[in-house]
Image (cartoon, coloured by chain):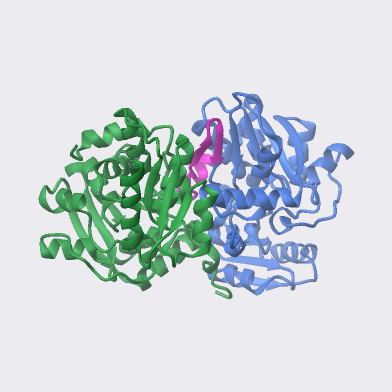
Chain colours: A green, B blue
Amino acid sequence: MDVTRVEVERAAERIAGYVRRTPVIEAEPGVFLKLEYLQHAGSFKPRGAFNRILTAREAGVPPASGVIAASGGNHGLAVAYAARTLGVRAEIFVPEVTAPVKVAGLRELGAEVNQTGAVYSDAFAASLKRAAETGALDVHAYDQPEVVAGQGTLGLELREQIPGLDTVLIAVGGGGLVAGVAAALGDTAEVVAVEPERIPTLAHALTAGRPVDVEVGGVAADALGATRLGSIAHRLLAEERVARVRSVLVSDEEITEARRELWRSFRIAVEPAGAAAYAALLAGGRRPGERVAVVLCGANTDPADLVVRGE
Amino acid sequence: MDVTRVEVERAAERIAGYVRRTPVIEAEPGVFLKLEYLQHAGSFKPRGAFNRILTAREAGVPPASGVIAASGGNHGLAVAYAARTLGVRAEIFVPEVTAPVKVAGLRELGAEVNQTGAVYSDAFAASLKRAAETGALDVHAYDQPEVVAGQGTLGLELREQIPGLDTVLIAVGGGGLVAGVAAALGDTAEVVAVEPERIPTLAHALTAGRPVDVEVGGVAADALGATRLGSIAHRLLAEERVARVRSVLVSDEEITEARRELWRSFRIAVEPAGAAAYAALLAGGRRPGERVAVVLCGANTDPADLVVRGE
């Protein structure tokens, strides 16, 4: 299965009723905020998780042993949520260092949590081994066609919600969302792929001509901390060039300030990754008359630091 | 000027372009959340403030000496915001005990802040005296026809956004919003007027047959803390009965839990007053097939207590 606009449209039919069609508000004339943080489980990730699981079910291989994922963050929450909704078992693998509050959040959604290994890649390897043993369906955080197609359904909504859309700003981690949206939009809009300066997986892949490992750090590492761009994202964005894609980097300071500004002006509380695209808008501006969508992609955050006392 | 649906429609034309048309999301089949906390200045209040000021301007009496209001809360922020947008001066009167962070918030919006008197009624009296001296336009928090008509524009949006709407749940303080929405909806939907048990201005007015003073306390007092129902709200809701209105009380515990649930399930951070209507839905449920709108009316809150650690 390749990820084309047709695949994204099929995904949209498949997951309708399971995910929220999140609203858009016009923040100022021509600037539209896509409130995807209102999605189930607090980020866009259930789109891909539902599409992966429902595709398997349609193909006649319902995951009898349930589903498996490796993630202590948004992806883990999304897979746990989707599994609970669909009545299948979820096993989520996380590294031993994962914060207790994250483990508790996964368990609250009914998932079985396995804390294994020192770092994420250990937990990921353990999850694949376990899936091979049990026959459970592994749901990757970004590098499976069904996952990318599922995330792309957000792009179809943007096309419907914003007539005359010129540009979409999206944060990039492993590239599942940006690749899916690019497939959905094709040449109808420019896609601005926004990355923290400290996690430039796409920027470095474009320079190197292939996905390469980057060092991961900074305020958005919990949600955009993939060490390299996914192979599907690379194929769609760099090789097939399914859409006009521009790579932009933002600093941690710009992300933090954008997050505060979203709270100040809109009472929107997002995580740093969810504010990265807005940071790029604030830094880069836009052309006269340009119609821009800014995807606010997640809000799994502690909002305690949003009020700057005495400000 | 009386407050009829026609007046609300005129208000909508007048304030279009100055206020946000806030989105609605379908939380579950038949339950719609009106995200009015995304409004400018963090609550529905700018609707009424803009309508009051723009009506005066249309009538040929532009407020040369600016506008005046008494409020350290949502109303004060809204008047300051509207005045700044329209390029007029704003003087906001607050009691001496008002928290420095609230005074700073008003000044950040360009308002001149006068701290006068021990309690709100002192500040209110001082604001009227000052308005009489300077000729500034006083903008009441809820008991002026232009203010009520402005708040009612939210009801027009609900009618357009939710076909087949049966019921609207709205929090009540002085009654400006609920009265305006009732005028906008007429007999097309039932209006459930939700009050904290500790501030039952409408419930007591309905019992007494006239607005009466109530004691004010509890978690929502900062935004719903009017000591008695406004006379316009009483006339529309109790005497003219412009809509089917049902009075419902919720406890502080129910409000606090509803506020936490909005964060857990939707990553929506509202103030206690903004969660009161949702508390009533959680407590009272709904009839099979009933289509309900829940107005989330404000988010001027410190979100620090939304994450229950170790939950």
**A80 sits to left or right of A123:** right
Locate the N terminus of chain A by quadrant: top left
- Residue A286, x across and y down, in percent: 27, 58
Residue B87 appearing in the image: no
Magenta span contains residue B27: yes
Magenta span contains residue A79: no
Quadrant hosting residue A216:
bottom left
**B262 sits to left or right of A34:** right
Q: Which residues are magenta?
A: B11-33
Quadrant hosting residue A125:
bottom left
As rendered, which of B225 and A85 lies closer to the eye? Answer: A85
Q: Measuring 23% from the left and 52% from the top, which residue is drawn there?
A: A191
Residue A230 appearing in the image: yes
- Residue B79, x across and y down, in percent: 59, 58
As rendered, which of B111 and B158 lies closer to the eye? Answer: B158
Q: Measuring 74% from the left and 69% from the top, which residue is drawn there?
A: B95
